[in-house]
Amino acid sequence: MRELIIRIGKSPDEDLKDIFANPKKYAKPGKHILYLKDVTELPSVLSPERLRLLMQLQESESDVSTLSKSLQRTQESISRDIKKLEENKLIQKRKKGKHTFIKNIYPRIAIEMVKG
């Protein structure tokens, strides 16, 4: 199962030291880490609207029009959120004819907060 871990307050450099010291601990395929400097960055990645969007995409891939209807939001706002989620590599897009289908990549998202 693919998993995304959002680490808040820890830098990739700190993890690199641990990875080299304990490589077997980190040898888990499908596990990806997104680093945020502090908790104030979290809403820019996972706002409540984006979380609802990801939850909707858990069930199946969908297009913007369908998501707009099911989430009762404008297509423009859905498209903006899709762009932000794609920038953070949380979704995949697939084109079929004139339609673009969006898929949630990670069925599991964990948030870890580290005191600085």
Image: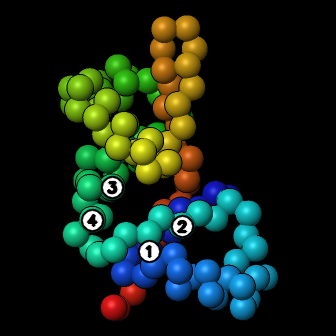
Of the numbered discs in the image, which one, if any, rests on residue 7? 1
Q: 17 or 63, which is in the foreground? A: 17
Quick check: marks 3 and 2 in contact, CB under 8 Å?
Answer: no
**Residue at image mark 2:** 33
Query: Mark 2 packing: few (<14 Cα in 10 Å), some, or many (20+)?
Result: some
**Residue at image mark 3:** 45
**Residue at image mark 4:** 41
From what the image shows, is residue 98 above or below residue 102? above
| Figure disc tally | 4
Quick check: marks 2 and 1 in contact, CB under 8 Å?
Answer: yes
Q: Position of residue 29 (x, y in %)?
A: 73, 63
What's the CA distance linking mark 2 and mark 4?
Answer: 15 Å
Quick check: marks 2 and 4 in contact, CB under 8 Å?
Answer: no
- The quarter holding residue 85 reads top left
Q: 101 or 56, which is in the foreground? A: 101
What's the CA distance linking mark 4 and mark 1?
Answer: 11 Å
Q: Position of residue 59 (x, y in %)?
A: 51, 40
Residue shown at 55%/54% (left/top)? 107
Mark 2 or mark 4, earlier in chain? 2
Q: Secondary structure at mark 4?
A: helix
Left or right, 85 with reference to 74: right
Residue shown at 33%/74% (left/top)? 37
Q: Secondary structure at mark 3?
A: helix
Q: Amino acid at mark 4?
A: Glu
Residue shown at 55%/19% (left/top)? 95
What's the CA distance linking mark 3 and mark 2?
Answer: 13 Å
Mark 2 or mark 1, earlier in chain? 1
Of the numbered discs in the image, which one, if any, rests on residue 60? none
Q: Amino acid at mark 1?
A: Arg
